[in-house]
Structure formats: C-alpha cells, structure tokens
Image (spheres, grey):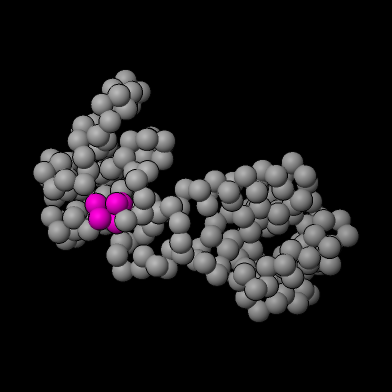
Amino acid sequence: MNADLRVVIVGGQHVGYHAARHLSERGHDVVIVEKDPARVEFLSDQYDATIIQGDGGRRSILQQAGLGRSDVIAALTGYGAMTNIGICTMAREIEPDIGTVARIDHGDKAEYAGLVDRVVYPEQLAAHAATNEIMHVAGGGVQMIEEVTGDLTVLELTVAEEAPVADRKLSEVAFPRGAVVVAGRDSNQLPGPEMVLEPGYRYLVAVKTDVSDEVVRLFRG
C-alpha cells in the first residue's frame, strides 16, 4: 500500500466520522459515504473531505466513491454486522484487490474470518477504554493497551512497591509460559536479562489470557 492511503468510509455517524478525522490528520485521503442528508450537511460543515450522499449498500454509490483508486473500504454503519459485511463483499466484487474493514456489533470476531480482512467492535473498544480509566482512577496500575488476538493481550503494568518483581532483573523473574515483557514504558528500554523492574515504573507485557491474572499478581502483589 502507499504511504498516503485513499480510504472509503461508509457510514458518517460517530464511528465513521472520528475514524475519518484520525485518518485525515495522518495525511490520508478519505471519502465518506452517508445517506442521511442532515448528517451529510454536518459532515460538510465540519470536515474538509469528499462526502457522498447515498446508500453505501448500492453498487452505483460504491462505484461513485472510486473504489478502483482506493486502498481500503471501511463499512462502519450502525445497521449491524451483516450490513457492513455485505457492503465489503460488494466492494470486493467491484474491486477485488481492495482491503476491507467491517464494524460488527456482536459475536466473536472469529465468526467473520474470511469474509473481510478485519473487523472492529466499537462497543468492546469503549469498554476497554472505560476499564482502563476506572483502573487509573483507582490506582490499580493495570491497563489494557491492545488486544492482539482473542487470546493475546498487551498490558501496561505498573510495578507496585511490594510486588514480587520489584527491584529484580528480568533474568531473576520466573514468568509463566505465555508472558513476555516487551518494553519499559517510562525508561524507553527494550527488555534484556539485566533490565530491572523498578517500583512505580510502567512496563508493556504481552500475555496470554490464561496467565494474565498470574502476571498481574507478579507486578501488583
């Protein structure tokens, strides 16, 4: 793909709008397809981008969006997973090489494997963000940074004063299988056997779900 992408976003409500803003701020070319005339007017006032009024589930509207010149189509409407999957499927019929992203509203992401390249579940992402803020306010010292797969997560863990890993080198800590320290957040360190896990410092740790509680106890006590 090019460094500067051309992305078609179908659905200009909150999720689509903010995704478009983020992409545009990173220098990418974004086209938004939205069928609600009032929302189209809002987008035109708020956002300097190509806005197409129409039903993104119609072939003629997708062709108007210029899929042949685009790298990715993201179907982010609020009309349900199958509507968004259908939009991506039609887009692939028009332009077989285009990348596809679909918003889902329920179920396991694995259910959609092979139908689109990637899926996004905004409600789950919002729940992760809310949990992180709750933990931050409570001084819990644990935040989820990224869910890599359904079974692998990157956590940001702050070492507590009396934690089992406090003031110990990585080589001295017996982490469970399925857990790897990937970076020192505050010290900008890459992990090595001599890196000391300092109390009050934050570390990024990739963990499998079945050992996450054990890893949290090592860092938090």
Residue 149 image offset from top left, x and y in percent = 50, 66
Residue depicted at 59% across the width and 61% down the height: 154
In magenta segment, residue 87: yes
Residue depicted at 56% across the width and 68% down the height: 152
Please indicate whether residue 198 sits to the left or right of residue 68 in the image: right
Which stretch did the figure color magenta? 83-88
Camera-nearest residue between 20 and 77: 77
In magenta segment, residue 186: no
| Quarter placement of the N terminus | bottom left
Residue 40 image offset from top left, x and y in percent = 28, 27
Which quadrant holds residue 174?
bottom right
Please indicate whether residue 119 sits to the left or right of residue 157 in the image: left
Which quadrant holds residue 183?
bottom right
Outermost residue toward the bottom? Answer: 177
Please indicate whether residue 198 sits to the left or right of residue 193 in the image: right
Residue depicted at 14% across the width and 59% down the height: 93
Q: Does residue 101 appear in the picture of this structure?
A: no
Q: Does residue 56 appear in the picture of this structure?
A: yes
Camera-nearest residue between 164 and 30: 30
Outermost residue toward the top? Answer: 45
In the displayed structure, 26 sits above or below 208; it is above
Residue 76 image offset from top left, x and y in percent = 35, 46
Residue depicted at 66% across the width and 79% down the height: 177
